[in-house]
Image (cartoon, helix red, strand yellow):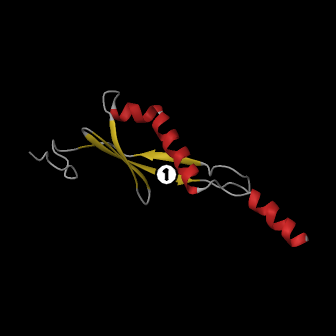
């Protein structure tokens, strides 16, 4: 009985499931004032792509790489703490390669 109780108590002190963690990260990323400073308020975000080191944001004119660094939860339940490192936006050509041309 003691082993079962131990398993129940240790499972409570876990990080968020991956979906919840990534949702928290994306919401935080989009609410960062620094993101708007880098891209400008006139740039709509078209794609958010998860990469090995963080996120790639694609707008009409730019791509922006954002690295994410994770902290320690110290055994506390909830989201894993994280911080962002922003790279300089890269101006794209007028026709991104991943878009398909309109077919007649």
Q: Residue furthest top?
A: 41
Q: Residue at x 72, y 52 (%)?
A: 77
Q: Residue furthest right?
A: 1
Q: Residue furthest front?
A: 104
Percent of width and height locating residue 29:
48, 41
User: What element does badge 1 sit on?
Assistant: strand
Crowding at dot 1, Cα within 10 Å, few <14 / some 14-19 / many 20+, comes out as: some
| Quadrant of image for the C terminus | top left
On the rendered structure, is 30 left or right of 71? left
**Residue beneath disc 1:** 68
Q: Nearer the viewer, residue 34 or 43?
A: 43
Which quadrant of the view contains residue 12? bottom right
On the rendered structure, is 17 left or right of 6? left
The tally of labels here is 1
Percent of width and height locating residue 1:
91, 71
Q: Nearer the viewer, residue 95 or 35?
A: 95
On the rendered structure, is 14 left or right of 4? left
Q: Residue at x 68, y 54 (%)?
A: 73
Q: Residue at x 41, y 57 (%)?
A: 51
Percent of width and height locating residue 46:
32, 41
Q: Residue at x 49, y 46 (%)?
A: 84
């Amino acid at each position: 009985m003691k082993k079962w109780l131990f398993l129940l108590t240790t499972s409570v002190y876990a990080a968020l499931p991956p979906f919840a963690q990534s949702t928290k990260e994306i919401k935080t990323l989009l609410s960062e004032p620094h993101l708007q400073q880098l891209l400008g308020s006139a740039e709509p975000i078209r794609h958010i792509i998860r990469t090995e080191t963080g996120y790639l944001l694609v707008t009409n004119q730019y791509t922006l790489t954002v690295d994410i660094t994770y902290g320690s939860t110290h055994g506390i339940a909830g989201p894993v703490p994280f911080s962002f490192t922003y790279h300089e936006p890269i101006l794209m050509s007028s026709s991104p390669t991943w878009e398909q041309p309109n077919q007649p």
